[in-house]
Image (spheres, rainbow, N blue to C red):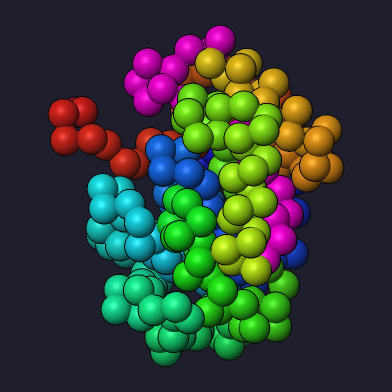
Amino acid sequence: MPEMTEKLKQFCDQSKVLIITGHYGSGKTEIAMNIAIDQSQRDDRQVAIADMDVVNPYFRSRDYGSLYEKYGIRMMASSKAASDADLPTLPAEIRAAFDQEGLFTVFDVGGDPTGAHVLRGYRRWLESVPYAMLVVVNANRPETGTLDKATAYIEAIEQASGLKTTGIVGNTHLCRETTEEELLKGRKLCEEIHEHTGLDIVCHTVENGKFPSDGEDVYPINIYLKKPWEV
């Protein structure tokens, strides 16, 4: 399995729940899947992934149950009906993320402030355990492509969820058309966000095997989500 960066390892080690959010097309679900699979290789913890995404109808964590079963990862899903409420209720299945000893859960959260609003209904449970919230930034998404837009987006996520962001993940890409120039553009934006907000840059992702991955801040990820026209 690809190696996590030291900062990402620290966030995983220190958290019982790791929240991954980001704008539609940022790659947040792909990253959530990679983290869950990587953590499942550890002998000292059980791993679950909770599909909290009520926004994106295309790539949903819940659609990859067979992959999670292969790695012994527990799949949880929020109730769609509950997610549409102002304050979503807590399904018994997801309650295990907070109550079950030795269980590490990755929350894959919807890609805009509306999607992040679902977290507000879980806030008191999240604040009862060690958690972290990472925002995935893709400089090629028009809604987060500049410093002003990206920071406004992060602030909107925090306002909707009632939770504070604890780090950012740089994941600038153009799917299979990604170039090293695109990666450098993403790095520059993340550095600007870090300087402006003080948020840690937890890692910069690259597709495993396609780009050099020897930097200490680089997290090579496997691509599990494929569009219908991709082989």
Whether residue 115 sits left or right of residue 80 in the image: it is: right
| Front-most of residues 201 and 47 | 201
Whether residue 53 sits left or right of residue 203 in the image: it is: left
Q: Determine whether 221 is above or below 18 in the image.
A: above
Q: Position of residue 113 (x, y in %)?
A: 51, 56
Q: Could you tell me which residue is drawn at 70 percent across and 78 percent down?
A: 127
Whether residue 17 sits left or right of residue 210 in the image: it is: right
Q: Could you tell me which residue is drawn at 73 percent across and 39 percent down?
A: 201
Q: Quadrant of the C terminus?
A: top left
Q: Position of residue 160 (x, y in %)?
A: 57, 63
Numbered range of the magenta stretch? 163-181
Q: Could you tell me which residue is drawn at 41 percent across and 22 percent down?
A: 174
Q: Position of residue 32 (x, y in %)?
A: 48, 52
| Front-most of residues 182 and 225 | 182
Q: Position of residue 93 (x, y in %)?
A: 41, 84
| Front-most of residues 137 and 206 | 137
Q: Determine whether 147 is above or below 153 in the image.
A: above
Q: Is residue 218 visible?
A: no
